[in-house]
Image: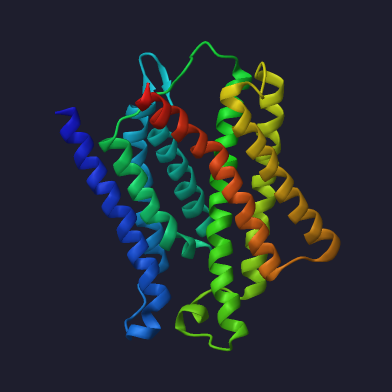
Amino acid sequence: MPYMNNTLIAILATLSYLGSALIIGLRLFSSRVALKKPPRQAGIALGLAGVVLHTLLLYQALFTDGGLNLGIFNAASLSAWIIVLTLMLSAISKPIENLGIVLLPLAAIALILELAVPTTYIFDPASPWGLRIHAIVSLMAYSLFTMAAVQAGLLAVQDQHLHNRHPGGFIRALPPLQTMEALLFEMIIIGFVLLSIGLLSGFIFLENMFTQHLAHKTVLSIASWLVFSTLLWGRFQFGWRGRTAIRWTLAGFVALMLAYFGSKAVVELVLAGGG
């Protein structure tokens, strides 16, 4: 019965996420298909409903008798939950709900994988509080940079259309280019602060960040930190923007994605499966 309940909750959460993405898509493309725009509040409300249902599933998956289960698909689901929660709450006061057209379907996929493919990586409940802060803050940083990467993708499409002087209905539905860039750098600055705290706490509370199973994760995380610090320095020193900002953002995100989920995939799926 609990499994059936979880399946029903997962279906409802998935439908909520996809319904929210559909509303956002209709608002973006309605001028092309001659449809009346649905209210943006409906998309935000459906997204938040999905977050509430997602929370119920996450709680059961994460908190086990042995400790916190941060298996790869649980971690991906938790990251998706943080992303959508941040997105929907921010969308109440800022025009960033358009990111949901990409992020909400990805959250639905993460939720389904969490339920369909159980993975186990127990975070020792006796671990120091500093390590817990490191894990949580690092995941929050990854979530912020995921949003920034999608924002950079939208910005690239918008920039391309404006340079070609073909601002179609989709582009007209987006906020002005300057607003989109300002929102991008807000996400990057917050994500960079969180990533800095995550790296610092790791060096303080982990015995050795360069042990064999952590070395690649540490090196890639530092590489990502250097990319984003260079981008922010270039932004404030030389006014970097447009395609330069987009390229640096995507490069930093790829490094961070490989650092966290790439390393987890190797350790939990490849090595564990081979062993």
Left or right of residue 164: residue 53? left
Q: In which quarter of the image is residue 236?
A: bottom right
Q: Residue sitting at 48 percent across and 15 percent down?
A: 124
Left or right of residue 28: residue 217? right
Q: Is residue 46 above or below residue 264?
A: below
Percent x, y of residue 173:
49, 77
Q: Residue sitting at 66 percent across and 24 percent down?
A: 209
Which residue is more in the foreground, 115 or 2?
115
The answer, for residue 95, to whether it is visible in the render is: no
Q: Residue sitting at 64 percent across and 56 percent down?
A: 249
Tell me the quadrant of the picture where the N terminus can be found: top left
Q: Which residue lies furthest to the left in this view?
A: 1
Which residue is more in the foreground, 135 or 17?
135
Q: Is residue 149 above or below residue 111?
A: below
What is the total number of numbered labels drawn onto the structure image? 0
Percent x, y of residue 45:
37, 56
Which residue is more in the foreground, 240 or 219?
219
Percent x, y of residue 189:
70, 50
The answer, for residue 30, to whether it is visible in the render is: yes
Q: In this view, does 149 lie above or below 63?
A: below
Percent x, y of residue 96:
53, 62
Left or right of residue 49: residue 259? right
Q: Residue furthest top?
A: 126
Which residue is more in the foreground, 48 or 227?
227
Left or right of residue 188: residue 54? left
Q: Residue sitting at 64 percent across and 46 percent down?
A: 191
Q: Which residue lies furthest to the right in this view?
A: 237
Q: Residue furthest front?
A: 274
Which color mode does the image show? rainbow
Tell me the quadrant of the picture where the C terminus can be found: top left
